[in-house]
Amino acid sequence: MIGQLRLFRRRVRVMMRRHGPEALIWRRRIAILAGAVLVGLTALLFAELADHAGALFRRMIAWCWWLPLVVTPLGFAAFAWITMTIAPAAKGSGIPQVIAAARNPDAGMQQLVSARTAFVKFWLTIGTLLFGASVGREGPTVQIAASIMGYMHRFMRIPLRASVFIAGGAAGVAAAFNTPLAGVAFAIEELAAAYEQRMTLLVMAAVLIAGMVSLGLAGDYVYFGEMRQTLSVHDALIAAPVAGFLGGIAGGLFSRLMLATGSTAWKPMRWLRDRPVRLALLCGGAVAVMGVITGLTWGTGYETAQSVITGQDVPIWFGAAKFVSTLATAMSGLPGGIFAPSLSVGAGIGDMLRSLFPSYPQGAVVLLGMVAYFTGVVRAPLTAVIIISETTASRGLMMPLLAAALVADFSAQLVSKERLYHGLAKRFTLPG
């Protein structure tokens, strides 16, 4: 009898270790749940503060139009120095850092997605919007979200795997845009070099929870507003390939120039690369001059893109001007993403396409330009299509958008063989 009781107790202890509250599976589930909730809350706070920073800058230029000619270059130089001194891994978008960190998760937690890097990334990205930098918050949200998910797993004593960062980054995209499907697509296309079946549940759960937090607190909003226009089969067969080719070439050119910045042997560029503060000062001057002349290229470009989608006119040169401003900001090395500015450039390209197809539904043509340029930059056609579809509620345009994205992906390769984020990720080396 005593022997049977001991055997029973031993079996209970084994069952508790395997399936009780302290079991690895339950600790992993708690880490996913808590991490995704925290990602959703952080993304909402990030969005709110970024919007306030952009609004404050707009009030500043309304009060004194020439002030950015002084403030913006100095701000670029100061933030480049702060980034280089405190957290070098916080520079740029943040997505290349997550890609690099996924190759060696433990080393990545020490540098590329560390708490210091995430903290600096959060506040300096907001700061860049205070002086008109052409940046977005979506890429930084990916890096910050990966850091949050990594620390939550460490807190729960769970070994780090690449899937932890991928799930965090996907949750960040979902919360930033309020687009759960885009988060999953982004994990598959961009963050994971080889998408493993075992990470499917982790990604899905993180995206769903972060999306629910964003939806519950911010409401069921559509990022760019609803756009219900569609294209006939005949119109789509003509407009989609044209938009895809032109947008893909433009996006590929952006990637080519960005990658060349860090590798070109051209002496002036090499001299500036060795003096990052001076490079940032020069880039800030270019952004300031472009912004003062046009009045349209500051910040994320969200409002301008939204107005183009809804049928309002912008100058024909807006897309090219925003392209230059975004390229200069990205070259400076400041913390900040290119998602939102790229969508704005794409809207400018779509606006130019409207003059080629005056009889076509104008909003639909603009979306073709947006998806084509965005695909050309990031080379992730599925993510681009889903982001545009979810941020504009334009599900009736899925097939034309996909056609334009596939053409853009092909045409971008004619200009830049290497994918932007993966090329930039090679610059972040980790031990081991």
Image (tube, rainbow, N blue to C red):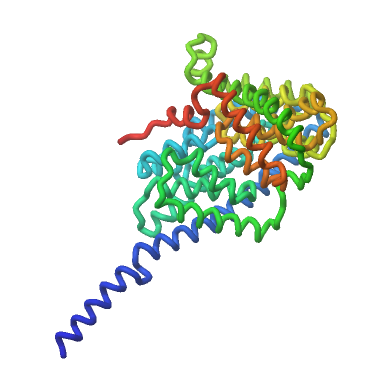
Residue 322 in the image: x percent, y percent? 71, 26
Left or right position of 222 against 259: right
Q: Residue furthest top?
A: 267
Does 430 appear above or below 73?
A: below
Dividing the image into 4 quarters, which one contains the N terminus? Answer: bottom left
Front in this rendered view, residue 80 or 321: 321
Residue at (42, 48) in percent of width and height: 163
Q: Residue furthest bottom?
A: 1
For the image, the number of numbered tags is 0
Front in this rendered view, residue 256 or 415: 415
Residue 178 makes an appearance in the image: yes
Residue at (62, 43) in percent of width and height: 386
Residue 375 in the image: x percent, y percent? 60, 32
Residue 67 in the image: x percent, y percent? 76, 27
Left or right position of 65 against 126: right
Residue 320 in the image: x percent, y percent? 71, 22
Front in this rendered view, residue 108 or 225: 225
Does 277 appear above or below 216?
A: above
Residue at (31, 68) in percent of width and height: 18
* Quarter residue 4 falls in: bottom left
* Quarter residue 40 falls in: bottom right
Dividing the image into 4 quarters, which one contains the C terminus? Answer: top left
Front in this rendered view, residue 72 or 219: 219
Left or right position of 212 against 96: right
Left or right position of 46 against 421: right
Residue at (38, 43) in percent of width and height: 105
